[in-house]
Image: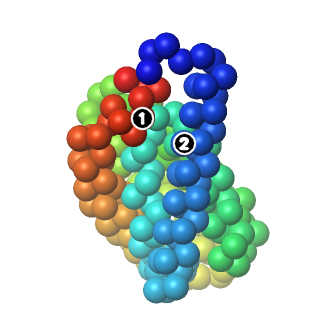
Amino acid sequence: MKNQTPQSRSVLFLTHAALIAALYVVLTYIANALGLANGNIQVRFSEALTILPFFTPAAIPGLYIGCLLANILTGCALPDIIFGPVATLIGALGTYALRHHSKWLSPIPPIVANAIVVPLVLLYGYGIRPLWFSFVTVTAGEVISCGIFGLILLAALSKYRTQLFPDQV
């Protein structure tokens, strides 16, 4: 795949970003149907995808757009529609920045970004109190989604890295 033209690389980048966004939306819908996507206690299965910037920079816009669309389509409040995707974007950028250090650090940026931003969104967007409880529950949900499910996904995808992300080999 080293002989790709700039145009074919752009198409591959956009395709990866679009697929990641679509997966994020679908997985959020599943979590939402189970009552796990929004509110004080949330375990979004889609947050496991936040490890994908470890493999490809296309995941950064894909995760942002996916989170934005998922929050709009699941009826989130305006602060959640604005700041939820920003937290995901910050986490994705952090994961991408750490990609050359250790794959085990990949879930840390999204966990930290969401643990800080989402409780404040819950407070100001939905009036959910107490704030300290939201910090605890959101962090726990992110550890499950990003830390456990994300690392399982990372381990599974590492085996097929060259086939799935040929533009990064």
CA separation in Å, label 2 and label 1: 9 Å
Q: In the picture, which quadrant includes the C terminus?
A: top left
- The amino acid sitting under disc 2 is His
Vertical relation: 44 (above or below) 9: below
- The amino acid sitting under disc 1 is Phe
Q: Would you name the residue on which mark 1 appears? A: 165
**Residue displayed at 49% across by 46% down:** 91
Image side of residue 73 versus residue 129, left or right: right
Name the colouring of the figure.
rainbow
**Residue displayed at 55% across by 75% down:** 29
Q: Nearer the viewer, residue 101 or 125?
A: 101
Outermost residue on the right side: it is 78
Vertical relation: 90 (above or below) 11: below
**Residue displayed at 60% across by 74% down:** 122
Mark 2 and mark 1 residues within 8 Å of each other at the beta carbon: yes
* Image coords of residue 118 (percent x, y): 55, 65
Graded by Cα atoms within 10 Å as few (under 14), some (14 to 19) or many (20 or more), the crowding at tag 2 reads many
Q: Nearer the viewer, residue 112 or 93?
A: 93
Vertical relation: 154 (above or below) 129: above
Q: Which mark is residue 16?
A: 2
| Secondary structure of residue under mark 1 | loop
Going from N to C along the chain, the mark reached first, 2 or 1, is: 2
* Image coords of residue 32 (percent x, y): 53, 80
